[in-house]
Image (cartoon, helix red, strand yellow):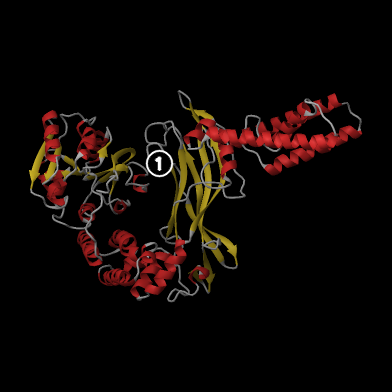
Amino acid sequence: MPVYNAGSYIDRCAPSLVNQSLGADAYEVVYVDDGSTDDSAERLERLAEAHEHVRVYRQENSGWPGKPRNVGVDRAKGKYVQFVDQDDELSYEALERLYALAERNGSDIVLGKVHGTMQGPSNVFKRTVERCTAADAPLFESLTPHKMFRREFLREHGIRFPEGRVRLEDQLFMARTYVRAKTVSILGNYPCYQWNRREDGGNNSSRRITADDYYGHLDKVVEAIKEGTPPGDLQDRLLRRSYRVELLRPVSEPRVLRRTGKDLEEYFTTVRRMAMTSYPPGVSEGLPAISRLRAELLVRDRLDSLVELARRTEQIKAHVEVDDMRWRNDKLVLRTRIGMVRGDGEPLTVVERGGRMLLDPELLDGIRGAEDWEVPDPFSYAYGELIVHDTADNHWWYPDGELTPTLEPLGGGRHRVVVAGESVIDPLTLSGDAPMSTGAYQVWGSAQLLGVGRRPRLAPAPGSTRIALGTVAVGTPPRLVSPTWAGPGGPVFGRDAFAIGGNEHVARLSGINVTARKLSLYALTGALSGLAGLMLLSRLSGSSPGTGGLSLQLQAVAAVVIGGTALAGGYGTVIGTALGVVLLGVVANALNLLQVSSNYQSVSVGGVLLIAAIANEMHKARSARH
């Protein structure tokens, strides 16, 4: 661990390092103090005195983490080294699990699942992978050095961190390791590394970054990949990440819309020069449609077109449709589709014209240099998946199942690209090798289509029918799982009331103020009851405390049940309830015309209620089987 003026963060991180499940006799903790001027040295000295497996080295300030990391590798005695930053933490079993995975496979590098306030969901850690390489896994999507490395592998290839103030030093180090590693393993079923954002912003450098400085260092990363791979498809694929994420960033939203004047011109000129000199042609040619268009406009010197394209693509949103949701063998099965819609609410499309597939002409209308932009492969880099967020521990988990890209015809040669498929959430296995812990979980979608990536929360679209499922008990001992619609979509008051009716405990964990909502609901129903009483009074021209109350209560319950709401609470519709009221009114008028006794009328309403309840239960049972 490199240390510089870490202060109290040393004490926050230390327990997670010195108390690993691997056992103090099986590993060492090496601190390298890079000339701290605060009390870090004293804190480290106290740690070393308290723990025999802690060693501390001091050096003059080098200004960057590279040199202290290299010193740590040189002084380390173990077969493997794990890099940790001074404000981060390791989970209790991290080293034990990573070491076991490395030994089992003879790994050069082992990636442990990362979580924390500096890390969002990453499908690099979607599953545990015993053996892979950069050729068959998306390793370049994880370029931080918070990983375990076989020390002899680093020595054999002479791989070290650049020393001094070097931007993108982590990317350079990881690029050199990935292209040379023969076996890489990924531990995806256990969160190992907690990557924390410091409250004082200490993760970020205060030194101003210039375009030439930043992209000069990116050029070294590109050269490292070229040195480690032969020209061709693999090299192009590995370089595509830096082209898409780093090079195109200054000419994409939001950056290109925030910068103006000389600052914008400086970045544009710098990345344009690098695009034309540093990357082989196959890199940009293999990008998805909109990213490839940006690359073309960049090379053609069309900054104005890039700005306008960014304005329009910034307005593109994901449209999620939940086609089906059901319990199957104690697993929650969701069938979803995700597409993209433009700022005007219309689908983002491709259009067949003259035997070619063109990118949405309405999106590109009036953008110079983007006319009739061809899309050779609408499915290039297209993917989709669902992600489950553990809101309490901030972990992201991936259900089984994939969303497959497909073209959906819209007529007139227009098609929309969507990802669709079935995802299976198993409460007993989703969160690695242990059942899901108690708490609230959110389901999100993630899609990359035509070069546009979005991560929407699964929520009912306004006006759509919401599928409702009951609470089930899974596992031994039983755990109650309750799928509940919450989050964006639909009126907030009605959404919260629906969630409370489905499961009050889960609604409270989801952040809903249950007490306040229930008081509001009781006040509303009381006001509506009073209004109904006034209407009845005006009709009868007189009343007593018991007039109509009991009989109308039965009719009200029956109307709601006929409308689809289960007696135990949950899902129903306003239209269905209104139809239930109409049906009961017709039945009541018919019985009055037949001069049926009021007592028998109540029995008939009870019979209708019983039939509706049985029908609802049969429908739920049939849905569960499918």
**66 is higher (above) or lower (below) than 553:** below
Image quadrant where residue 73 sits: top left
**Pointer 1: what residue?**
397
Residue reaching furthest front? 542
Q: Residue at point 59% right, 33% down?
A: 519
Q: Position of residue 153 (x, y in %)?
A: 16, 47
Instruction: Indicate the quadrant where residue 533 lies.
Output: top right
Which residue sits at x=51%, y=51%?
420
Residue 63 pos. (x, y %): 14, 53
Helix, strand or loop status at disc 1: strand
* In this rendering, position of residue 337 left or right of residue 111: right
Eyeballing the image, is 219 above or below 495? below
Residue 228 seen in the current view: yes
Q: From the image, which quarter does the C terminus lie in?
A: top right
- Work out whether residue 228 or residue 12 is closer to the camera in this orientation and state it: 12
- In the picture, measured across the screen, residue 116 lies left or right of residue 451, that is left
How many badges with numbers are in the image? 1
